[in-house]
Image (cartoon, rainbow, N blue to C red):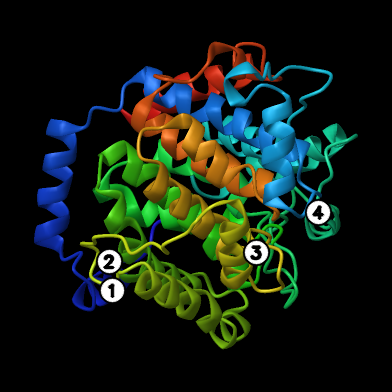
Amino acid sequence: MKVSSASVRHCSSNTPNTPGKALRRAREFNMSCSASLKHYQAGMVLSGTGDALGYRWEFVFSGKAIHQDVQKLGGVKNISVKLPDWPVSDDTVLHLATAEALATGKEGEELLQEVAFRYVEGMKDMDGRAPGMTTINSVARLQPGRIGGYRIPYDEKSGGCGAAMRAMCIGLRYPGPEQLSSLVAVAVETGRMTHPHPTGFLGAVASALFAAYAIQRRPITTWGLGLLKEACPIAKEFVKSAGYAVSETERDWGYFTDKWEWYLELRGLSSGTGPVEWPDQYGPAQRDAAYKSFSWSGWGGSSGHDAPMIALDALLGAGSSWEELVNRAAFHGGDSDSTAVIACCCWGLLYGTEGVPECNYSNLEYRDRLEKSAEKLYELSH
């Protein structure tokens, strides 16, 4: 599951992630990482909260209307997220499938078979959760237990967000800078179990990477540049070394990276230093318009590139405010559960549950499973 040393050297020569810097970052991470078990638990649990909050209005296409509905409920602080009114969506079911597979401690082919098996099992728990057709059709083609049964044929229409929304836990399993190759390899392979198009599986790389960056306490302004300059080159080399759908992947690679370069320029983050450049007005209506401009098809957050992009946009704008994060990541007219599940996981890894109303998560569906998977991933990563 690791990228070859030759591939790592090749990528390093074109990025700031040189071996010397990687070792220094690893030492700094080991010495200064302050993401505790409680942060891991908060990341997993709040990802489910964000999912449930966003899912409530996933198919309402006006952020302004959603915010009005939230105010009628008394605001975020008064929302008790629990069944039957606030179920999690397919996002959390499949995020748990990924997390619980990783929590077994398996590696390599054995891990991929385990993930594929759990995706197949997870699809039995989709009543009322609105899974995407790409995921439904792709999981139906998986054959866990057979050699190579975790791979499906290349699909040029599989650029959706279904891989991105379930990959954050990969960053919890491989959080250190020295584990970047493992993080990328697992994100690519598990992502293309359903979304073999690079716009799809690179979304998984982004979500996993951002979670790892949150654990590392890396400045949020650097995350997008790290995705482009550190993770994407390793992903491209991994695709070559794995030898699966190489020509198709290389042909379709550019959209994801081009769109991310555009976004970083838009926000003044092309150098990773900031300050972040925001529009003069950036309320619900303006965010809806902005998120559409991020998107491929006009529904912000529905693709592999823009679900983590909107999540990052929300994290940059919200700081340590849970309410502001939810306003930006969950309450908009796009694919709101998929953007919120990513953003809220990263936020929990950064800030824990401080400032989060207990009613938002205390009775969350699958809270116990989310916490237990967090505990196991924390143990494996330390």
Q: Quadrant of the C terminus?
A: top left
Q: Earlier in the sequence, mark 4 or mark 2?
A: 2
Name the amino acid, label 1.
Cys
Q: Position of residue 308 (x, y in %)?
A: 52, 55
Q: Earlier in the sequence, mark 3 or mark 1?
A: 1
Quadrant of residue 151 in the image?
A: bottom right
Residue at image position (84%, 32%) is 125
Q: CA distance from mark 3 to mark 1?
A: 26 Å
Residue 186 shows in this picture: no
Q: Earlier in the sequence, mark 3 or mark 4?
A: 4
Which residue is under mark 2? Answer: 5
Which residue is under mark 1? Answer: 11
Q: Secondary structure at mark 4?
A: loop
Quadrant of residue 49 in the image?
A: top right
Eye-nearest disc, 4 or 2:
4
Name the amino acid, label 4.
Gly
Q: CA distance from mark 1 to mark 4?
A: 34 Å
Eye-nearest disc, 1 or 4:
4
- Total count of labels: 4
Name the amino acid, label 2.
Ser
Which residue is under mark 4? Answer: 132
- Relative vertical location of residue 238 with respect to residue 205 in this rendering, above or below: below
Drawn side of residue 78 relative to residue 266, left or right: right
Which residue is under mark 3? Answer: 303
Name the amino acid, label 3.
Ser
Q: CA distance from mark 2 to mark 1?
A: 10 Å
